[in-house]
Amino acid sequence: MRSTVNVGLIGFGTVGVGVARALLEKGHLLEQRIGTRVVLKRICDKDLKRPRPVRVPSSLLTTDPRALLRDPEIAVVVELIGGIVPAKTYVLEAMRQGKHVVTANKALLAQDGHELFAAADRYGVDLYFEASVGGGIPIIKALRESLIANNLNTILGIVNGTSNYILTQMREEGLSFHEALLEAKRHGYAERNPSLDIDGHDAAHKLAILALLGFGVRVRLSDIHTEGINHVTPADIQYADELGYCIKPLAIAKQVDHELEVRVHPTLLAKTHLLANVNGVYNAIYVHGDLVGAELFYGRGAGQNPAASAVLSDIADVARNVAMGMARRVPAYCPDQKRLRVRRIDHIETRYYMRFLVIDKPGVLAKISGVLGRYDISIASVSQKERWAARIVPVVMMTHEVREANVRRALEAIDSLGVVKAKTVAIRTEAPRGQ
C-alpha cells in the first residue's frame, strides 16, 4: 500500500484557495480516515501576486503548469481554472503523464466529457468530478455508485443558486427581477455579468452531466432546450401561489416513451413537491429510480467551502485507489444500452400556466379560447385579475396536458390579436412520478 499520495493544484482562485486550505488543515484527518497521507506538493496559477486568505510555503507555488504536470512524484492533478482553454489541454496532458485528475469544470465536462472519459480509459487513470454539479451535494457519487442498480426515470434539479435566490427574493420580498438581481450581486451571489446563470446555461452544463450519469446518454448542449428566468414577474409568482404552485428554475431530464427529455426553464411546481421549499442559494436534485423511488439531495450548491468539500472527497477516493493500486475502480459512467434518443422540445407534453394582458371588453376571452381550441389546447381553469392599467387586465389560465408545438403555434396566433397588449407569458408545470 502506498503511504503518500502527492497532489498538484492548477488554479488558485476562490475554490482553489478553499481546497489548499482544507488539504493543509485536514491532511491528518484524511490520513486517519483513508489510511494514506495526502500531500499538497505544488500549486500553479498565472497570478501569484494577488493576496489570498491562506498561507502556503512559497516553494509550493509556480506559474508554470509544466512544473506540475511533468513532476513524476505528483499522482493527482486537481484542475480548478474552469473554462475550456487551457483547462482541457492541462487535463489531457496530466492523463498522458499517467496522472489521475480531479476537476470541478462543468463546462469542460458538458462540452468534451466523452473525449476526457475516453482519454482516462486509454491512459488507465481516474477522472473524478463531484464538484461540477451541486457544489457540496454528493450527487455524482450517488449516481455513479449508490444508485447503480436503479433504472432512473426522472432527474429534476435546482442547480443554479443565483437563479433560485432571485426567484426566492421575488416571492418573499415582492422584488422585481432586476431588483432581485441587484440584491444577488450585492451579496456576492451573482457575477458582474450574470448571463450564464440567469439565462440557464450554467444549469444546462450541469444537466448534460446529470443526464450522462443518470441515463448513460451523451447530450450535446445544443440538444438542451434552455430558457432563462428574466421573463418571470412578481405577478406571475403571485398568481402561481394563488393556484397552489411556486416557480422554480429547473433542470429536467426524464425518460418518456423511450426518449429522453432534457430542458432548462422556470417551472411551476406544486407546493407539496419535494423541491418546492428549496429556497435562496440552496441547490437540490430530485431523483426517481425503480428501486429507491423518490430521493432528494439537498445542500449548498456553490461557495468556497462546499466546493472544497466535494473536491477533497474526490481526492480522497483517488488517493485510496492509488494507494491500493486500484485505478479505474469506478467507471466514469455506464453507457445506455437502450440508446435513448433525445426528444425534441416541440414533442414534449405538459400542463401550462399562461398569462395574457388584454383589453378589458366583452368577447376577448372567447377569442383566446377559440384559438386555444383550434390547436387542441384544453383549459383547466381561467381567472381574470385586477386591472394593471386603464382597460388592461391580466387573464390567467392553466391548461391540461398539451403538446409544446401546439402551444407555440397558438400563442403566436393569440399574440397577434389586436386585443392582446403584450407577449403572453407561458410557463410549464412539472409533476414527477411518485408524487
Image (cartoon, helix red, strand yellow):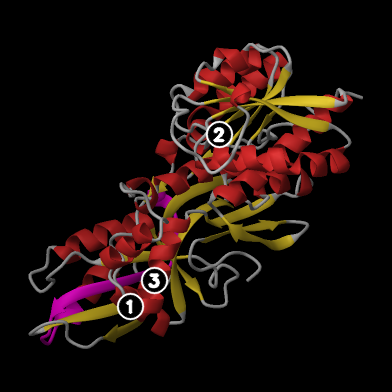
- What residue sits right under mark 3 in the picture? 169
Disc 3, SS? helix
- What residue sits right under mark 1 in the picture? 174
Is 200 placed above or below 88 here? Answer: below
Tell me, yes or no, whether the highlighted magenta stretch contains residue 360: yes
Asked where in the image residue 435 lies, by quadrant, the reply is bottom right
Q: What amino acid type is highlighted by mark number 2? A: Arg
Q: In this rendered view, identify the residue nearer to me: 215 or 307.
A: 307
- Whole-angstrom CA distance, mark 2 to mark 1, is 40 Å
Earlier in the chain: of badge 2 and badge 1, it is: 1
Query: Which quarter of the image is occupied by the N terminus?
Result: top right
Give the percent coordinates (x, y) of residue 372: 27, 69
What residue range appears in magenta? Answer: 344-367
- Mark 1 touching mark 3, by CB under 8 A? no
- What residue sits right under mark 2 in the picture? 218
Q: In this rendered view, identify the residue nearer to me: 234 or 374.
A: 234
Q: What amino acid type is highlighted by mark number 1? A: Gly
Earlier in the chain: of badge 3 and badge 2, it is: 3
> For the residues carrying marks 2 and 1, which lies nearer the camera in this image?
1
Q: Give the left or right position of residue 358, taking residue 428 as reference.
A: left
